Amino acid sequence: MKIAVPLKSENQIDSHFGHCEGYGIFTISDNKEITNIKNVESPQGCGCKSNIASVLAAEGVTVMLAGGIGDGAINVLNYNGIEVVRGCSGNAMEVVRLYLSGLVEDSGSSCQQHGNHHQDGHVCSHN
């Protein structure tokens, strides 16, 4: 099993999927232990307009633990066989461990309104 996480500095989950610095791909063993972490650079452009979903799918990723993410990016990831869990924040390694323990659930909320302002001032202008 492989889990991807959008990252910003200091191995923290980026709160806006489409603007992250890169992705951590965590390889998980059958007994739910992290056996490898690979970093993948983030392509330019918002998440739903980049090829990151196909890149992650080619790496074998089946789960994305994300912070804020728009419906367009979720649809592209789902189309590529990647389940998205929204509302994650904090240290990526810790969140992956919590997910593996069954303690992380999808928040149910995504960036879906035109003009939806985020804390960093970014305006989500697409679905």
Image (spheres, rainbow, N blue to C red):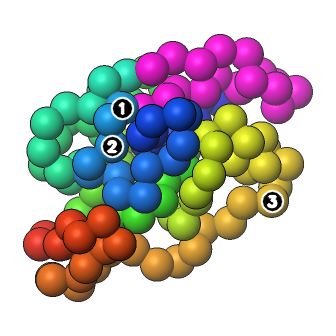
Mark 2 vs 1: CB contact within 8 A: yes
Residue 89 lies, with reference to residue 13, above or below; the image says below
Task: Tell whether 6 sits left or right of 85.
Answer: left
- Name the residue that disc number 1 marks: 22
Q: Residue at x 68, y 66 (%)?
A: 105
Q: Quadrant of residue 35?
A: top right
Q: Which is nearer the eye, 36 or 30?
A: 36
State whether residue 82 appears in this view. no
Tag 1: amino acid = Gly
User: At which x and y percent is residue 13?
Assistant: 51, 47
Is 76 colored magenta in this rendering? no
The span from disc 3 to disc 2 (Cα, nearest Å) is: 24 Å
Q: As rendered, which of 58 and 85 lies closer to the eye?
A: 85
* Badge 2 density bin: few <14, some 14–19, many ≥20, Cα 10 Å: many
Report the front residue among 91 and 98: 91
Amino acid type of the residue tagged 3 in the rendering: Leu
Quadrant containing the N terminus is top right
* Disc with the residue nearer the chain's start (3 vs 2): 2
* Quadrant that contains the C terminus: bottom left
- Give the residue at mark 2: 20
In the image, the segment drawn in magenta is 23-39
Q: Nearer the viewer, residue 80 or 33?
A: 33
C-alpha separation, residue under disc 1 versus residue under disc 3: 24 Å
Q: Which residue is under mark 3?
A: 103
Seen in the picture, residue 94 relative to 70 is either above or below; the reply is above
CA separation, marks 2 and 1?
A: 5 Å
